[in-house]
Amino acid sequence: MVSGKNRVRPTVAGAVLLLLAALAPLSARPAIDIQTLLDRISARLDSFNPKGNYTATIVSTQVEHDRKWRPEKTNVQTKALVVTEGHREQTIVKVLEKKNDGTTIDVTERYLAEQRERRERARSERTSQPEAAPPKPGGQRSSRRGMRMDDLGEILPFAADRRNDFTFSVRQTTDPSGLPLFLLDVKAAVKDVLNWEGTYTIDAATFTPIHGRLIPSELPTFVKELEVEADFEVIEDVYLVPKRTWIKVNAGFLFIKRVHITSEETYHDLKIVR
């Protein structure tokens, strides 16, 4: 037992520090619980029209790097995008190849010929193959499909039927202008190449995802490194589109030359077609 003579009396400054320490966890605690936040984000995403009709210009910049991630060649494509009832059709407008020696080559005609060949081959395959049977109810989604940044159901895992594959935690912050934001940290409980992990930035006023920085919870075959970043934009409160996407890939197999690529796509002149 501490005697009265040896008992330390708290000072005013010490009392203030104790009070601040006690209040700190309360101030850091999110003002909304996870399930409510996920429900509101999901409802916000459901409010957008998935069958959009709009046009845009896409500028796609792909940089090939050496093993030390030094740029070697840059390919810049300008494409016209037409979205009709959610179906995307991209047409190459111009393609430039830029090398480190400062030379730039217009390779548009070559890419247009390759695009025509791919479309003709796809058309022939569709007409020659029997119509595929509809998927069975409750069937498992394939984890080996190609990644599409416009497939919001895959990269925004907030719908009720996907949440069990993930764990979520939330933090609060503001942007430089003072706009309140939620930072939603996501970890995959079920590892899969289409179950992405990372941090989503959510507009706290509208519950709209505006940014994501992600990696797959399981790397695809022959891929050593894969990172994805995306900025989303709302068009006239009707459509949610990826305004900008950035991808970093380090892939290869055994003695085949490894691929070190960064790719960025930006959307411009977005217009709704009435």
Image: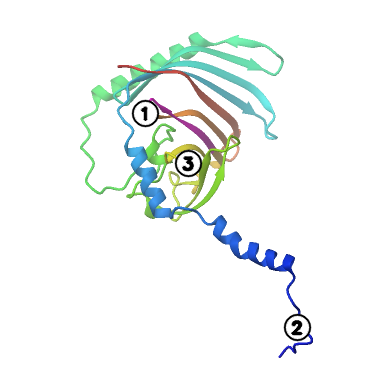
Q: Nearer the viewer, residue 220 or 164?
A: 164
**At which x and y percent is residue 53?**
32, 21
Which stretch is magenta?
Answer: 228-239
Q: Main secondary structure of the magenta part?
A: strand
Q: Quadrant of the N terminus?
A: bottom right
Q: Residues within 10 Å of mark 1 (few under 14, many from 20)?
A: some
Q: Quadrant of the C terminus?
A: top left
In contact (CB < 8 Å): disc 1 and disc 2: no
Name the residue that disc number 2 marks: 7
**At which x and y percent is residue 273?**
33, 17
User: How far is mark 3 from mark 1, CA to CA?
Assistant: 16 Å
Residue 152 is drawn in which quadrant?
Answer: top left
Task: Give whichever of discs 1 and 2 has the lower sequence position.
Answer: 2
Task: Give whichever of discs 3 and 1 has the lower sequence position.
Answer: 3
Task: Give whichever of discs 3 and 2 has the lower sequence position.
Answer: 2
- The amino acid at mark 1 is Tyr
User: How far is mark 1 from mark 2, CA to CA?
Assistant: 66 Å
Residue at point 48% right, 41% down? 202
Residue 251 is drawn in which quadrant?
Answer: top right
Name the residue that disc number 3 marks: 202
Name the residue that disc number 1 marks: 239
Q: Nearer the viewer, mark 3 or mark 2?
A: 2
Q: Residues within 10 Å of mark 2 (few under 14, many from 20)?
A: few
User: How far is mark 3 from mark 2, CA to CA?
Assistant: 50 Å
The secondary structure type at the circle numbered 1 is strand
**Is any part of residue 69 visible from this angle?**
yes
The secondary structure type at the circle numbered 2 is loop
